[in-house]
Amino acid sequence: MLVSALCIVPFYSLATGRQLAAVVFTIFSVFAMKLLGCVVVVLVYGWDASDRGYTAMPWEHPNLLVWLFLSNTAVLSALMYRAGRAKFINRDVVPCCATQPGAALNPEP
């Protein structure tokens, strides 16, 4: 969760401009990564995967769903980190005197 908080939340915060929306979007994004893992588990083990225990997430002995969830979240975090870094570097910062060329060099009396 720490990696998600440090990589995904800043991107959504820069994109939306609201911290609460960034947290909500992060929660839904991580939840979508779990759903994506569940889809793969069902495709691999069949529709009765939950009856056979493949959709449980045992952290002591990780199964396919745990590994898919962790890898999907890691890929999402890496992509959001790159996108957030680019958005932060390229954000619109206008210096105080950049609106008029030469305004800082030739102030009007």
Image (cartoon, grey):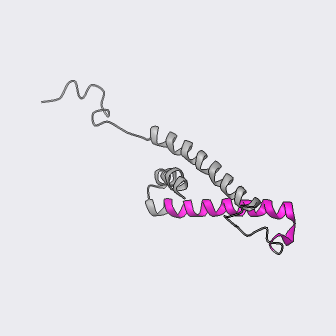
Q: Is residue 41 magenta?
A: yes
User: Foreground residue, 40 or 84?
Assistant: 40
Image x and y of residue 18, in percent: 44, 59
Q: Residue at x 63, y 50 (%)?
A: 74
Q: Is residue 47 above or below residue 81?
A: below
**Side (left or right) of 38 relative to 29:** right
Q: Quadrant of the N terminus?
A: bottom right
**Side (left or right) of 101 relative to 59:** left
Q: Residue at x 71, y 63 (%)?
A: 35
Image x and y of residue 25, in percent: 55, 61
Q: Which residues are magenta?
A: 22-50
Image x and y of residue 52, in percent: 83, 72
Q: How many marks?
A: 0
Q: Is residue 105 magenta?
A: no
**Side (left or right) of 77 relative to 49:** left
Q: Main secondary structure of the magenta part?
A: helix
Residue farthest to the left? 109
Q: Is residue 51 above or below residue 89?
A: below
| The quarter of the displayed image where residue 108 is located | top left
Residue farthest to the bottom? 51
Q: Quadrant of the C terminus?
A: top left
Image x and y of residue 20, in percent: 46, 64
User: Foreground residue, 68 or 108?
Assistant: 68
User: Foreground residue, 52 or 15?
Assistant: 52
| The quarter of the displayed image where residue 51 is located | bottom right
